[in-house]
Every structure is written in C-alpha cells, then in structure tokens.
Image (cartoon, helix red, strand yellow):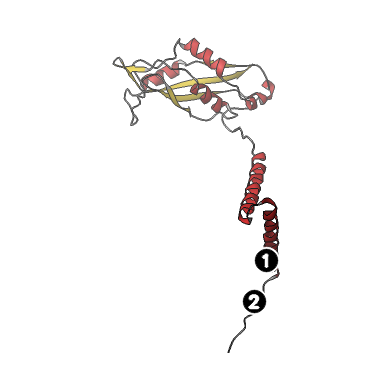
Amino acid sequence: MLYQIKVKYPIIMKTSLYLMIMMTGILSFQACKTGKNPDELQKDSLTADSLKKAEAAASKVTTTVITTGKAIANPAKKNGRWEIIVERNRQWEEDYARMMLEKDQLGIYYRTEVKPSYPGGEKALAKFIQENIVYPETALENGVEGEVMVGFAVDERGVIYTPVIKGDRAGFGLDEAATAVVSKMPVWNPGQIKGQNVKSYFSLPIKFRIY
C-alpha cells in the first residue's frame, strides 16, 4: 500500500518560496541583459547592499571626548586665552631622589645618576611644548584647566617611548593632548649610570592654564 504524504506549507513559507522564485526570475532576466550568470549578479547585489549598510553605519559614527576626570569646568574662563606651564617643583625633585637606582624586568632604570634631559634645557623644553601642543577645543569651550603628569621612558639613544598618564586622568581631552605632544618630542639626552647611557623612566608635569 502506498501512502501519499501531503505537506502543508505555512503562509510565511509560501511567501518565502514565492519571493525566491521571483528573485531567481529577475536575476535570470538581468543575466540575459548583462551577460553575467545569476550567481555573479547575486554577489554584486549583496556587495552593493553591504556597502550601503557600511556607509550608513559610518555616517552615524561620532567622536567621543572623555569629559570625566579631575579637571573641573569653569564657565567664567570659557574660550579664554591659554598657556602651557612646564615646571618640576621641589617635591618632584625629592620624590625622584628617593627612587631606586635599579632597573625593572624590562631593563629600564627607575632613576639614574644623571637624569635624562631635553636638549637645550628646561626653557627649550617649555618652548617646544608651548609651540606644539593643541589645547583641546572641548576644554576651552568649558573653561577647563588642569595638570597632567606624563610618564615615559628614554632609551640609550635618547628616544622617547611609551608615554602614559600617571595618577588620575584630567579628562576633557587634556590627557590625550599631553601624551601626544610628548610623543612628538625630539631625541633627548639619555640618563646615565657610571658614565654609560641607559634606559630610564621620567615624568613630566604639563599644566594647562586659561587666563
């Protein structure tokens, strides 16, 4: 005895099959006109669709500026004139003197007998930063001032690398501006121990001021 099995397609399935048949027909018709086979046309369609979606997603991307941190907005100084102050106080000198005269696992000394230095001295360093730093627009629009401590390493050749923020972040783009200008600095005079150039850490306080 033969049994005949009837499969009842739900309405959604019937609609899907109908659309697939229509799409196949359209692709076949376009294939005749363009000389491409249906598979190639389908790939072209998917590629075009992917590009449209990517463009739509890209148009929604916005730049986010970190505004959370220790810096505080002051409306009274909004869009004022600004300056950058680079100076190490006595406390910094005392803290540096207390650091260990030894290196870490990366071979970088915490402190050296002869500290790393910017060519030309402190005034030349302050001048370079003043001329090359970009005061963040978000900070200026909100009257934000603050001090950022940037730590970095100086290798045996005097090359600066791995600038990072030490301590709490200031926010409002000040941290990024400070590390960016440190990354641009020219070759330093490297730190020395027993007359030999060595890799060593160094910290630089950069103060953003509006007046």
Residue type at numbered disc 1: Leu
Image quadrant of residue 6?
bottom right
**The disc label shown at residue 197, or none:** none
Relative height, residue 39 to residue 116 (above, below): below
Q: Nearer the viewer, residue 162 or 84?
A: 162
Q: Quadrant of the N terminus?
A: bottom right
Residue 85: percent from left, percent from top: 54, 16
Residue type at numbered disc 2: Val
On screen, residue 116 versus residue 37, left or right, reads: left
Q: Quadrant of the C terminus?
A: top right
Residue 180: percent from left, percent from top: 53, 25
Q: Nearer the viewer, residue 90 or 136?
A: 136
Q: Which residue is mark 1?
A: 17
Residue 100: percent from left, percent from top: 33, 24
Q: Which residue is mark 2?
A: 7
Name the residue furthest bottom.
1
